[in-house]
Every structure is written in C-alpha cells, then in structure tokens.
Image (cartoon, rainbow, N blue to C red):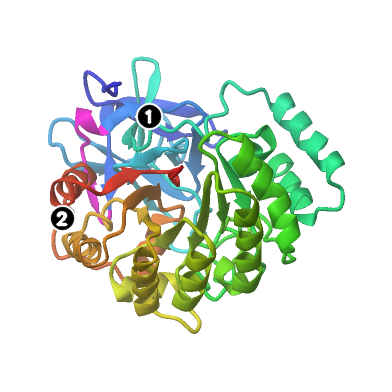
Amino acid sequence: MAELHPEKIPAAVYANRQGEIFDLPEYAMAGRSGNFYFLPEKEDLIPLPEDSELFILPERHPIAIDPLSEEPVLLEEAPGNKEIISAVAAFMAPAHTAIYTAAYEKYTPDAAPLPLFCYTAVGWLDGHFWVTGFRSDPDQRQDFSDIPQKLINSRTRWRLERHPDNRLIQHLGKCSLTYGCPAAKNYFLGRYEAPLPTSPACNAACVGCISLQSSGCCPSTQDRIDFVPTPEEIAEIAIPHLEKVPRAVVSFGQGCEGEPLLQADTLEKAISVVRGQTEQGTLNLNTNASLPQAVDRLAKAGLDSIRVSTNSARKGCHTMYYRPRDFNFKDVLESIRIMKDNGGFVSLNYFILPGFTDDEEEFEALCALIGDYGPDFLQLRNLNMDPDLYLETVQYRPRYKPMGIRNWLAEIKQHFPHLRLGYFNPPLR
C-alpha cells in the first residue's frame, strides 16, 4: 500500500509553558540532518503513525523555515506575546524510520540531554500532525492498537500465576506490566517474537544504553535483569513459543540486559535443550558481537541468526559510542564472518540518525562492510538518543551536506539488490 503524502508542506509547531501545542501557519516545518536544516519535501512526510507520541523539548527553541526565502528561522517567542516557546518532536511507532530529526536550538548552554528516545520532525496540516519518516517494515508485531490493555494484563497475570518459580517469566511480567515492553507483551499474548534476556553484565558502556547509564547522560528507561536464568527457565519460555506460534522468533539480547554473549555457557546449554526438543521457529541473538568464539559455539549449538547492533560502520565512531571493554571493532566483523561461515543469518541493527547515517563517509564505510562481510538484512532502527549528545560523542565533523535519508536508502538498494531491508528480526522458518 502506497504511503500518503501531504499536498503541501505542513506548518511549524511549538509548545507553550502549559504544554499546549500550536501551529505557526506563517512558517513551514523544518527538518534537521546533522548540523544542517532543510525544508522537507512532500515525499519525506507521512501522517503521524498510530501509537506514536509527541514530546516537548525543554530548553530548546524551535527552528522553522521561512516559506519565501526557504531559510531556517529561530523562533523564541509565541506570536502576540513574549512567552518563551519550546520545540516539539515525534517519537514514531515501531517499524517507522526517521528522515529528519526535529529542528531546534538550545537556549541555555547547559541544557540537560534529552531522554533516550528518537526525536523526529513534526508539523501540522489540515487538522493532522505529519512527520518526516517512512514505514520501513510492514510487519505488525509491535502494533497493539487493536488489543485492549486489559487483555494484555490478564494474559500476563495468568501466566505469572502458572509459573511462580520461573524467575525469567516473572521478570518478563514486570517488563510487560510496568514498562509496556512490546516483546514481553507479545510473549504473554502468544504471538510473534518472544524475549529471552539473560545477562546482567556487559562488556561495553554505550553512551545511549537504555538499561544501565554509567555515562551520566540521562536516566535509563528500564531496569536491567539482575540474575542469570537457568537453561531450564529459558527453555520453559522458548519451546512452547516456538512450537505453538506461527513463524515464531525467540531472541536473546534485550533492552533490559547487558551483553548476552557473556553468558555463552548458559546460552549454549539452553539452545541445546531447545533444539533437542523442537526444530521449529527461529532462535536469534541480539548482540554487540564482541566475542567471535562465543558466536561460533552458539552457531554450532543451533543458533539460527544474530542481529549485530552498531551505530557506525567506522571503527572510530563505533568505539566512541560503545566504549568497549576487552573487544574492538575487528571482533565485531569477525563475529559476522563466523556466523556466515556457519551458515547462519546475519542482520545489522544499524542505528539511523539523519545527517550521520547518510554522511558520505559513513555511507562508503557501510558499503564496504556489506560488500566484504555479506550480512543478509539491514534493520533501519532509529537511534534513541539526544542528537546533539550523539554527534558530540562521535566527534561528527561533516565535510559536505548529507546525502538525505531517502537518497541514502535508494543507493543502498541499488548497490545491494539482494540485501533485505526492514525493522524487525525476520522469521527464518
């Protein structure tokens, strides 16, 4: 189904001190890409997806586009009064990828970093909010718009009561009921992809980590698991899910844990137990790919696929973001090679940030990685982090304007026609 685009560019929006959002019909919305500001094209815009959220950005004035000059304009006060105004951004529902981030400028130099979300440019036209993005995966696995919360709660509590001694199921119950984790909700609903968090430890100190914030940038969005489940606790979740759910996926490596490869002994035993009882479904590992020999062991035990998370195809930018302990970017590449050599499926969970992702040097590095190591799938996941903090972290110093995310995507498709593109871990069976 073709995406809907507006007949003209939407108006800029802002928020007042009471949190009310207004439009500015005399200005067009702006989109940010790295250190540059642009007037979006109609093809860049879609209606705000259902289940998305709007965020007010404190201590940040909106930037709009003057429709006559098409130049960016900083807006500091509400029309008709001297009230200070704030920028507004959209956090798009899963399976959507940003083309531009929200355009703003800090009005206090020591403004606190934004929480760990993606901040997509948003505007207003004909009674609707519009965002700069596109649907990157038709899969509906994280669409809960037609599922009553009461049903999710009752299914979760029912299973918690039936498995009081399984610590992992109890942990996922908190993820479902407290944090609203889509993966946990899907497990309790008995559909799509189920999570298998296992590791309280990590060997990286990612600046944008969502479960443990050692960087001090902002609070983590959820608690990290504080125990290592047994292979039997893992199998009690994985086996029924793989056997009963059509095209099921179960995945080690979740937002509520550290690096699962650090628990390779446990994972290897769990995979052996699961594959000893069922060949159905897909066993997947979401990982920073830091331990190639552990990847080799798990692949030989029956792991079907890995999803390698990376912010960049360049060693320097990868290192500055992940801040690895006892591994390096060469290990990540070696893990990809080993998984492919074992006949496994490899996805890149490639964090998308307009202006950085589509920087020409980054594009060339990604093309080289894909060409040399042959991953099967590219997941177009938005980077959930304050754009300013991220660009400062990776020391972004562009030599040219970015390609544009739509152009970047077209080039990727042209260079690698067999590379699959999407958002979620694909089922392989």
Q: 98 or 184, which lies in front?
A: 184
Q: Is residue 28 above or below residue 118?
A: above
Left or right: 29 as drawn, with respect to 367: right
Q: Is residue 235 above or below residue 422?
A: below
Q: Is residue 259 visible?
A: no
Q: 170 or 300, which lies in front?
A: 300
Graded by Cα atoms within 10 Å as few (under 14), some (14 to 19) or many (20 or more), the crowding at tag 2 reads some
Position of residue 240 measured from the top left corner of the image (x, y, whole percent): 68, 42
Graded by Cα atoms within 10 Å as few (under 14), some (14 to 19) or many (20 or more), the crowding at tag 1 reads few
Q: Which residues are magenta?
A: 34-44
When asked about the image quadrant of residue 212, the answer is bottom right
Residue sitting at the far bottom: 326
Q: Which residue is mark 1?
A: 79
Mark in the foreground, 1 or 2: 2
Q: Residue at x 35, y 64 (%)?
A: 340
Q: Which mark is residue 401?
A: 2
Q: Which mark is residue 268?
A: none
Q: Is residue 159 above or below residue 400?
A: above
Instruction: Please state which amino acid type lies under the numbered disc 1.
Output: Pro
Q: Residue at x 59, y 40 (%)?
A: 182
Q: Which element is circle 1 on?
A: loop
Position of residue 51 measured from the top left corner of the image (x, y, whole percent): 52, 29
Instruction: Please state which amino acid type lies under the numbered disc 2.
Output: Lys
Rounded to the nearest whole Å, what is the CA distance between mark 1 and mark 2? 32 Å
Q: Is residue 312 visible?
A: yes
Position of residue 292 measured from the top left corner of the image (x, y, whole percent): 44, 75
In the rendered structure, does residue 418 fall within the stretch colored magenta?
A: no
